[in-house]
Image (tube, helix red, strand yellow):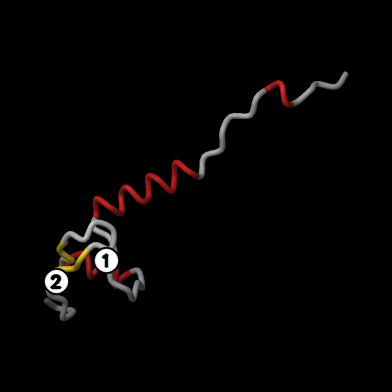
Amino acid sequence: MANGFKPRVLICSECGEEFAFTVAAQEYFAERGYTEDPKKCKACYTQYKKTKRDSGRSTPVSSSRYQIRK
């Protein structure tokens, strides 16, 4: 444990389940400059990202909306 990290157990803010914040994950967060602990477990975070990505997609535009001018 070169950086003084040790495995910790956190509680997911979404589902309330415990999840491990491993030494490797803590090193990853530290390398990227994150100062806060993760709030969501991996499953909830993955679902959050999927929902966010899907809601950002626009619906296809109907071709009848645009008229071709000659």
Within the image, what quadrant is residue 17 found in? bottom left
Q: Earlier in the sequence, mark 1 or mark 2?
A: 2
- Residue at the limit of the structure toward the bottom, as seen here: 4
* Residue at image point 58% right, 29% down: 60
Within the image, what quadrant is residue 14 found in? bottom left
* Residue at image point 72% right, 26% down: 65
Is 46 left, or right, of 3 in this rendering?
right
**The N terminus appears in which quarter of the rendering?**
bottom left
* Residue at image point 14% right, 78% down: 2
Q: Position of residue 28 (x, y in %)?
A: 26, 66
Is 32 left, or right, of 56 in this rendering?
left
**Count of marks overlaid on the render:** 2
Is 37 left, or right, of 24 in this rendering?
right
Element class at badge 1: helix
Q: Residue 1 bears which disc, if any? A: none
Seen in the picture, residue 40 relative to 67 is either above or below; the reply is below
Q: Residue 28 bears which disc, if any? A: 1
**Amino acid beneath label 2:** Arg
Q: Position of residue 52 (x, y in %)?
A: 43, 48
**Amino acid beneath label 1:** Tyr
Within the image, what quadrant is residue 35 found in? bottom left
Q: Position of residue 48 (x, y in %)?
A: 36, 51
**Residue pointed to by mark 2:** 8
Element class at badge 2: strand
Closer to the camera in the image, 46 or 17: 17
| Crowd rating for badge 2 (residues with CA inside 10 Å; few <14, some 14–19, many 20+) | few
| Crowd rating for badge 1 (residues with CA inside 10 Å; few <14, some 14–19, many 20+) | few
Indicate which label's residue lies in the foreground, 1 or 2. Answer: 2
**The C terminus appears in which quarter of the rendering?**
top right
Seen in the picture, residue 56 relative to 30 is either above or below; the reply is above
